[in-house]
Amino acid sequence: MAAGVAAWLPFARAAAIGWMPVANCPMPLAPADKNKRQDELIVLNVSGRRFQTWRTTLERYPDTLLGSTEKEFFFNEDTKEYFFDRDPEVFRCVLNFYRTGKLHYPRYECISAYDDELAFYGILPEIIGDCCYEEYKDRKRENAERLMDDNDSENNQESMPSLSFRQTMWRAFENPHTSTLALVFYYVTGFFIAVSVITNVVETVPCGTVPGSKELPCGERYSVAFFCLDTACVMIFTVEYLLRLFAAPSRYRFIRSVMSIIDVVAIMPYYIGLVMTNNEDVSGAFVTLRVFRVFRIFKFSRHSQGLRILGYTLKSCASELGFLLFSLTMAIIIFATVMFYAEKGSSASKFTSIPASFWYTIVTMTTLGYGDMVPKTIAGKIFGSICSLSGVLVIALPVPVIVSNFSRIYHQNQRADKRRAQKKARLARIRVAKTGSSNAYLHSKRNGLLTEAMELMGTPEEGHVGKSTSLAESQHHHLLHCLEKTTGLSYLVDDPLLSVRTSTIKNHEFIDEQMFEQNCMESSMQNYPSTRSPSLSSHPGLTTTCCSRRSKKTTHLPNSNLPATRLRSMQELSTIHIQGSEQPSLTTSRSSLNLKADDGLRPNCKTSQITTAIISIPTPPARSPEGESRPPPASPGPNTNIPSVASNVVKVSAL
Amino acid sequence: MGAVMGTFSSLQTKQRRPSKDIAWWYYQFQRDKIEDELEMTMVCHRPEGLEQLEAQTNFTKRELQVLYRGFKNECPSGVVNEETFKQIYAQFFPHGDASMYAHYLFHAFDTTQTGSVKFEDFVTALSILLRGTVHEKLRWTFNLYDINKDGYINKEEMMDIVKAIYDMMGKYTYPVLKEDTPRQHVDVFFQKMDKNKDGIVTLDEFLESCQEDDNIMRSLQLFQNVM
């Protein structure tokens, strides 16, 4: 029932009195209107803008937030109004929905914001009125494409170590940028396609004369060379096709796909030629078959995105193309007939039959005008001019549709590429912001530890407590601290100033690496001057072997080698995909990093000397197993260095 | 050449609705012309003052306000024509066809037979139906049944009414509606109402018979508290 019509219910019920005398049986009792309130005004305060409406207006749609008792959660006793901390602009549309029964979608509004608001108020977007529904659906589709693109690119960058060989090969074929081998293969095939096409072309060029015979095309003069080239190309193509066939996830679907058909058509002529003998009759057909070799040029569409877009456009404009063809055919037949009969009278006319006039009509309509067939009679000339004028029109009509389709698809692709390019920069900026905040936490922790240490030692240092934190920050920090306590894991703080900590701190907390080392070494009966080595910081092995008393409480995080990972990795407080390869020195993945650390670590732990670099804070480590340069961990340091470090291809997860 | 010009112009415009063809646009053009003419002839009616209506009917000011708000929402022009009336009534009976009964109702509401129901007519009728005396209600119902308003109900009129009521039920009923049922219903009605068995029911016969029937009396009081 529509909204406003609910107001007519009294009328409908009253009209039911007309049935009473006709009825044979007694009527059921009417439902008692217990809660009979007078209609009252409700004030809805949305971010300061006050909307007022009747209560019954809102109650028209009882399955939404405003229509049900859910709005009581937002009731403000002091001001006796309902307060919503949401966007007032969108609320206007929502309230109009209650009033008029039609939900409109304003064009200036962002689609996701609008969807969020609708979801909040419990309104289904399907109710959007016809006037705005098309626009809404268009925007929604664009947004969905954008999300899909994001997901795709995310998925592409994920490192999936558990792919089978076949799957890796398929991925290498589809996305050549995933590995260098794939890239090499991509370029090699591209090169051979080009070579093959060029040979096909050059084969037919007349190549100078052999004395005593007429001019030969190059193909016959250097037949052996060309044959070898052809063979090589076909070998490569065959190998490529077979590899793709092997790697394809669904072989049946692969065989049916367009690209595979092109591949087959490109290499078939050669094999057929091999098989066939030099029979005179069949060689004619064989020559025809060689034409198909030119299809190799279509293999370039794997290498060129523009070609693919063009192909896709043509496919999606099939109906417009069909219409173009049909209308052209109609016009050609009409004009050819007219021209034939007009020119029938003139002598030595080239318009010998209607099909012969087809050629003239086509050439004229497409404004080519070769001039090999020209009307001579006056009627013929008149009709010829009409033909050329109408030709322009008929062709110009469907072409913009095709062009607009192409442009839309092309721009879509451009948008996708642009988004991917922007995404890296965006993510880097986000990461900097996030690391800033997490740095703040660790700074405060460090400061907190410092003060604690100072208290422990009883030596009043310079009162270097660091900058004061706001209430929200301190609460956030407290929260992180609680998390540490809960999980028994800890964030690492590399600060050599905290080396003064004693081992009295027994709890699992945010500790520094040195403490960690110290504890490890104590438990393994090693007592060496604490140093800081990057290798020590990340190692599951150390955990299990050295820190027996830790092992019970420590849990291994899914992705990183825990419990102790480096400061840098833990600075991401949420899972972020870090991409990019700007730093060639940091191309090793985190897991391998840790692995190497692990390898380098065990001997450290067990042997009687610490062979890892003795590192002082400001300078990069003299030696580190990964050859990575350790950025100075002074307080401003990590901030600036994070982007560079974080440019590893890493997936890091939070606690 | 023409193709190039065409493409440039098309790239300027927004790429919306490429599939709408020439015929569609021509149709739109024609429709717009008709609508321009219609614009002039739209009627707007405002009801009499609130106090007057309050005096004339049995509703309070507040109730009139609520009624008017609902009325105006559905019919911004201030009058209801038969189409809108039928549409509104049909919304309450989605399963069946309420158009015939709505038609009769409309004519019962439209006391002056102008073809449109103004707010005053609407409220007057509602006042009778919801707040009126039994006598008034029965009178109104008699007026509803008397389709040609000649003061008598004959069997054909009653058949129409009963059929219209059955139509509202729709096809999917239990037990399934038989061809004969409306006729039987009308016969029962006439047996009850037609005192002198002359084939028509006058107002007095109607009033008398209804007042004798307890069921009817009780059911007339059913909608007292609707407002």
Image (spheres, coloured by chain):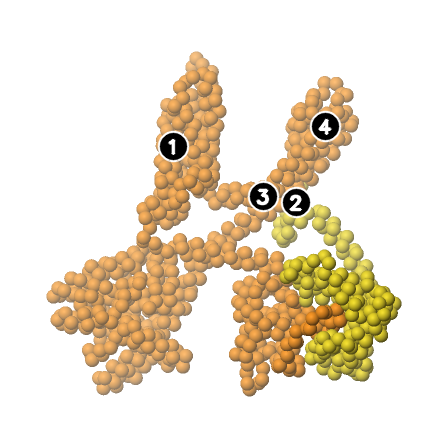
- Compute the Cα span from label 2 to label 4: 29 Å
Q: Nearer the viewer, residue A151 or B70?
A: B70
Which of the two marks, 3 or 2, is nearer to us in this view? 3
Q: Residues within 10 Å of mark 4 (few under 14, many from 20)?
A: many
Q: At 30% across and 75% down in the image, what residue appears?
A: A486
Q: At 24% across and 59% down in the image, what residue appears?
A: A595
Q: Are marks 1 and 2 in contact (CB under 8 Å)?
A: no
Point out residue B24 in the picture as x, y percentages from the top left corner: 71, 49
Residue B97 location, quadrant: bottom right
Colour given to chain A in the rendered image? orange
Q: Are marks 2 and 4 in contact (CB under 8 Å)?
A: no
Report whether mark 3 lies on the same chain as mark 2: no
**Please, which residue is most extreme toward the right here?**
B150
Point out residue A191 in the picture as x, y percentages from the top left corner: 40, 37
Parent chain of label 4? A
Residue B65 location, quadrant: bottom right
Which of the two marks, 2 or 4, is nearer to us in this view? 4
Report whether mark 1 lies on the same chain as mark 4: yes
- Compute the Cα span from label 3 to label 1: 34 Å
Colour given to chain B in the rendered image? yellow
Q: Is residue B217 above or below residue B147?
A: below
Q: Are marks 4 and 3 in contact (CB under 8 Å)?
A: no
Q: Is residue A177 above or below residue A37?
A: above
Q: Residues within 10 Å of mark 3 (few under 14, many from 20)?
A: some
Which residue is the site of mark 4? A337
Parent chain of label 3? A
Which residue is the site of mark 2? B6
Point out residue B125 in the picture as x, y percentages from the top left corner: 78, 74
User: The residue tagged with tag 1: helix, strand or loop?
Assistant: helix
